[in-house]
Amino acid sequence: MKNTLGRMFRSYVTTIMLVLTGSLAWQTPADATDPAQDENLAYAIGVQSYINSFPLMDLYRTMWETSFDPKRGHDRTLNEFFMFDRLVTSDDDWVVTPNNDTIFLRAFMDLRKEPIILVIPPMGDRPYWFPIGDMHHDIDANLAWDTVGSRGGAFAFCPPGWEGVLPDGVKRVDVGTPFIWTLGRLAVSGPEDVPAAVALQRQTRLVPLNLWGTDQVTRPRPDPTGYLRLTRADLTDARTYFTSLNELLRTTPRQGNASDEAMRGWLREIGMEPSARFDWEALSTETRRGLERATVDAHRILARRQQRVMPVINQWQIVRLDRRMSGEPVIAASGAMLGLLWNPVEINGYDITFFDGSGARLDGSKRYVLRLDPPPPVKAFWSVTMYSAETSRLVPNPVNRYSVGDRTPGIVYGEGGNVDVFIQHEIPSDPKERANWLPAPAGPFYLVLRHYSPLPAIVTGDWLPPPVVAR
């Protein structure tokens, strides 16, 4: 199953590139002798580099907005945790497609000065996961209850090229870029379990290497002026996008990555030398026009592909992500647009659908049932979560229920162990349907089926989600 999915992923990338190449052939003859004067060459390079770099750019944009933007709504910054100590609701907009199963510990770290040490306290029997990712959204480590164990530990994140001695008892974790991220998750069995999970959350720490062993760790105070400013609006502005990309490629390099080296060769054709500052004004009118077109079209491609970017079975996108997703640029970029800070398959798999079994778009004006027979086989837990297709956020509803899963209080199972999830806007009149009700908005929506610490049947494709059926 995994090899088949990989071949399908690569075919998507190939198809996109062939379509782009074919669309250029008839526009104007390639008669420019200077690459800087060829609008179509700049366009082709711009589309490829935009798609390839989108996870880097959107991750950095998230880092800047959550660490430095004065409108961020909290006082956390780099090298410290923003602890989200409650379950996410429909009022939260800090990340798209969030889960409602765990509490979070989010951190972006700047390792250019020294390693940062993550301290995970003893967690008992509570499942937890700390994916450690680079700025291209590749996963460098998975520090979790089923890899590290219930006793936790101390782990030093070391940037490329760092050489030094770590304290006794601290394990080294090598990462791919000088900036990294983690979105730690602690499982929560409903609102009543939140206080116990929060107590463990608050014992989880980030400690700079030079402060290891001291009685008190002072809060970091990074200077915002020392960091590139990047906002969501900048992702669709060609001048800002490519100028910012040049700076990030110079400040957050990956060593020995073949894909990055190939892309640098293309970027040199449009005057973007990785070792030098990029000057948009020095570009020819043709090159600027090509990059402007490319930014619009590449962003549009990703926005449309996110609804069909993965292999589709029973109208569900079957998302089983490898740790090194940057090698599949269309998949990685579309995934970043749909929901940043995702997990590799060993942490959890995702099934995503915008459609019912007949191919019609899911809409709250209709009623549906999802029969899980059997439910997803997992070591931890599973859930089905509802999202507005218009906002990519959780959907407000009168019972404040955003997901249904094996931990939903009062969930009703069939005689054979199956679970029927009833999906509609209005409250069901039948008590059994009401117990398994997943409230929908009045308009279009999509669903995400998550399976945490999946058993082999999910990884291999022996278990697959059934279609959502209109009633």
Image: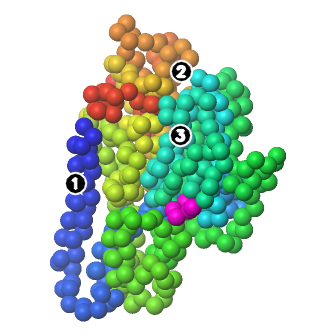
**Within 10 Å of the Cα at label 1, are there few (<14), some (14-19), or many (20+) other Cα atoms?**
few
Question: Which residue in the protein does label 2 denote?
Answer: 408
Question: Which residue in the protein does label 3 denote?
Answer: 143
Question: Which residue in the protein does label 1 denote?
Answer: 11
Circle nearer the N terminus (1, 3):
1
* Residue interval drawn in magenta: 159-163
Give residue 284's quadrant in the image.
bottom left
Amino acid type, label 2: Thr
Circle nearer the N terminus (3, 2):
3
Amino acid type, label 1: Ser
Give residue 394's quadrant in the image.
top right
Split into 4 quadrants, where in the image is the C terminus? top left
Horizontal arrangement in the rendering, residue 8 relative to residue 93 (left or right)? left
Distance between mark 1 and mark 3 Cα atoms: 32 Å
Check whether the beta carbons of the residues at disc 2 and disc 1 lie within 8 A of each other: no
The relative height of residue 10 versus residue 459 in the rendered view (above or below) is below
